Structures are given as C-alpha cells and as structure tokens.
Image (cartoon, rainbow, N blue to C red):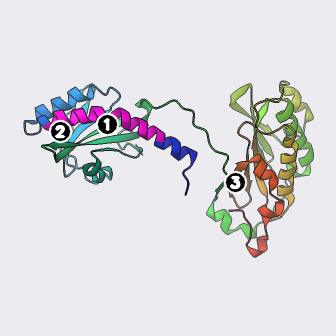
C-alpha cells in the first residue's frame, strides 16, 4: 500500500531528527563507555556533560544490555535521584539497537508528563562489544523540526463511521428537514457566500439545518449559520464583497454544480442519503458524510464525474459503495 503524504512527511522528519541526534549520542556513548567500569558518579557525570550538548533533551540515562537502568535520570538541570534500576526491557526499540547502533522510537504519549514524546537510543560498546545503551527522551514540541509545510494529497479517502449506525441502516428512513424544504434557496445563498462574499470552506449539515462557514478575511474563526440565517437572503449583506480568489482550485462556475450534486445525493435514496457536504475551494476537496455515517473526501473533479448511482448503488442488494 502506498504511503500517505502524512506518512511521507513523518519519514522526512524522522530522518532529519536522526541526522541531528545520532552524532552527539554516539559521542556520549563513547564517554559513558570509558566510565562504564568506574563508579556511578563517573557514569552520571559523563551523561550530564553529554546532555549539555543537546539542550532540547528532556532526560538522558544509561541501561545495561537487559534494559535495566544503571544511572540516575540526567536532565539539563542536573542529576536526579530517582529512576535508577528501572526496567526498560519491554521497550520495543531496544530489540533493534544491537543491530544498527542507533534507533529513534515511534512517538508516544509520556506516562510522566502526558506530552507527545520520542526516545533516541544508542548502543554503548567497549572493544567493539555491546555493553549497554544510552537513551535520550525528548518532548516533540522541543525538537528542531524542519519547516516544510505539510500538505494533504488529492487522493480519494473513504472512512467508515459508527458501526452501531451502520448496523441499523436499513431500519431508518430519511426524515425531511426544514432545510430540505428550502434546499434550492439555501444552496443559492451559500453559493453567493462562496463566489462573491469570501467564504472558502463550507460545511452544510442538511439533516440538522445549519451550515458552518470559514471566510478568507477571518480564517481562524468559523460562523455558524442557523436555518433562519440560511433562509434570509439578507445574510449575504453581513459579509464583505470579496472577489473569488484566483488561486482557488475549484473554478467559480463549478460551485453551483457541486451544490446541485449535493441536492441529488440528499434526495436520491430514502435510506442512503447525504447528511453533510463540505467544499474547500483552496484544496479543491469535497467532503461527504452519508446516513450510514461513512465519509468520503475527494478532489472536486472526481466527485463531479461520479453519478448518483455510484454512491447509492442497489442498496437493497447490498452493492452500495458507501462504507
């Protein structure tokens, strides 16, 4: 299965972190190796001198080959008294270290501070023979990550919903909402907001008679438009006139076509029907949530190329494409 853009971004960040952390941890492991057969104070001191080279490290400690901690926890503030003799042998990343010397764990929620964290482990060797490990823990927020912007892909994504809703799907039937009774006027108002009034993302909740609107000139906030707002054409006057953005991926002429398709999917079947439809003109993505609670996200061109029968299928025959 091909990796997602998020997974590719994670791999990129992990490779960058590995490049940053592997060299200083190797140097620290050499210093700890030299102090290995000395007393605990020498090991702790080697770790403390090492952590000063990695100022964003939260904690540094040494373990034997069985994963038993032999040092104190070392922080940039000094040597702590607790955690000596803690058993870390159940950590999966310890299995890999003797093979490749350096391992960066998967991110996890710390049991100590409840923050997303990560651990880097380096093998300690003496005369080329493994004798133990050093482990450095970091809060993700403290790490020097790369600044490349993460962007999702246009790939069609299909997500299953609540199994309890799916299990009773064929026992339910669409109840006409008040929005349904005025759906053409409501979508005309929302079309005006998107094409002339700066709305770049809209979620239309057909079953619960409301819409959520994000605007270009106030992107960090959304407005909730209740049914009374959506049925009042004057609501358009509450928003500034803003030209349709040139960098929108959805052409202005396609907005009405998308709304018309939403209407088709709302009324095409009394059992499997559209509950929520969303449009984002900048990433070009369409979101659909159906009565079975399953959701789809896809590029607008792919959405418009599908026919209603593709979505609804032969529901009674069990051939519907809805998850």
Above-or-below relation of 219 to 321: above
Q: Which is nearer the eye, 132 or 111?
A: 132
| Comparing labels 1 and 2, the label whose residue is closer to the camera | 1
Is 283 left or right of 39, judged from the image as shown?
Answer: right
- Name the residue tied to disc 1: 22
Query: Residue at (79%, 39%) from the top-left corner?
Result: 250
Label 2: how many residues lie within 10 Å, few (<14), some (14-19) or many (20+)?
many
Is 129 left or right of 93, judged from the image as shown?
Answer: left
- Residue lying farthest to the front in this orientation: 128
- Name the residue tied to disc 2: 71
Q: Can residue 207 be seen in the rendering of this structure?
A: no
Q: Earlier in the sequence, mark 2 or mark 3?
A: 2
Is 47 left or right of 261, judged from the image as shown?
Answer: left
- Name the residue tied to disc 3: 296
Q: CA distance from mark 1 to mark 2?
A: 21 Å
Above-or-below relation of 289 to 229: below
Identify the element where label 3 is drawn: strand
Q: Hey, which quadrant is residue 14 in on the image?
A: top left
**Residue 269: x %, y % from top left:** 83, 64
Residue segment shown in magenta = 12-33
Q: Earlier in the sequence, mark 1 or mark 3?
A: 1
**Residue 193: x %, y % from top left:** 84, 34
């Amino acid at each position: 299965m091909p990796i997602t853009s998020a997974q590719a971004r994670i791999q990129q960040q992990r490779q960058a972190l590995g490049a940053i952390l592997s060299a200083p941890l190797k140097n620290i492991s050499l210093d700890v190796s030299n102090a290995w057969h000395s007393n605990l104070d020498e090991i702790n001191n080697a770790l403390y001198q090492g952590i000063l080279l990695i100022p964003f490290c939260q904690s540094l400690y040494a373990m034997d080959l069985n994963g038993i901690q032999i040092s104190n926890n070392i922080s940039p503030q000094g040597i702590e008294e607790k955690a000596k003799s803690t058993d870390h042998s159940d950590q999966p990343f310890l299995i890999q270290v003797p093979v490749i010397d350096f391992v960066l764990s998967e991110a996890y929620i710390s049991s100590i501070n409840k923050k997303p964290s990560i651990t880097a482990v380096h093998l300690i060797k003496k005369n080329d023979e493994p004798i133990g490990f050093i482990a450095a823990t970091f809060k993700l927020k403290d790490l020097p990550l790369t600044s490349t912007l993460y962007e999702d892909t246009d790939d069609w994504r299909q997500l299953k919903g609540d199994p309890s809703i799916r299990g009773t799907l064929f026992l339910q039937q669409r109840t006409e909402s008040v929005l349904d009774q005025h759906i053409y006027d409501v979508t005309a108002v929302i079309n005006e907001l998107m094409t002339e009034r700066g709305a770049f993302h809209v979620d239309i909740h057909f079953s619960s008679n409301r819409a959520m609107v994000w605007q270009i000139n106030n992107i960090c906030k959304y407005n909730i438009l209740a049914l009374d707002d959506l049925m009042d054409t004057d609501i358009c006057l509450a928003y500034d006139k803003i030209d349709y953005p040139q960098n929108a991926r959805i052409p202005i002429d396609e907005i009405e076509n998308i709304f018309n398709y939403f209407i088709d999917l709302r009324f095409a079947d009394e059992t499997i029907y559209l509950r929520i439809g969303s449009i984002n003109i900048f990433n070009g993505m369409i979101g659909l949530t159906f009565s079975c609670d399953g959701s789809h996200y896809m590029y607008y061109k792919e959405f418009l190329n599908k026919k209603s029968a593709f979505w609804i299928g032969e529901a009674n025959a069990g051939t519907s494409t809805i998850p």
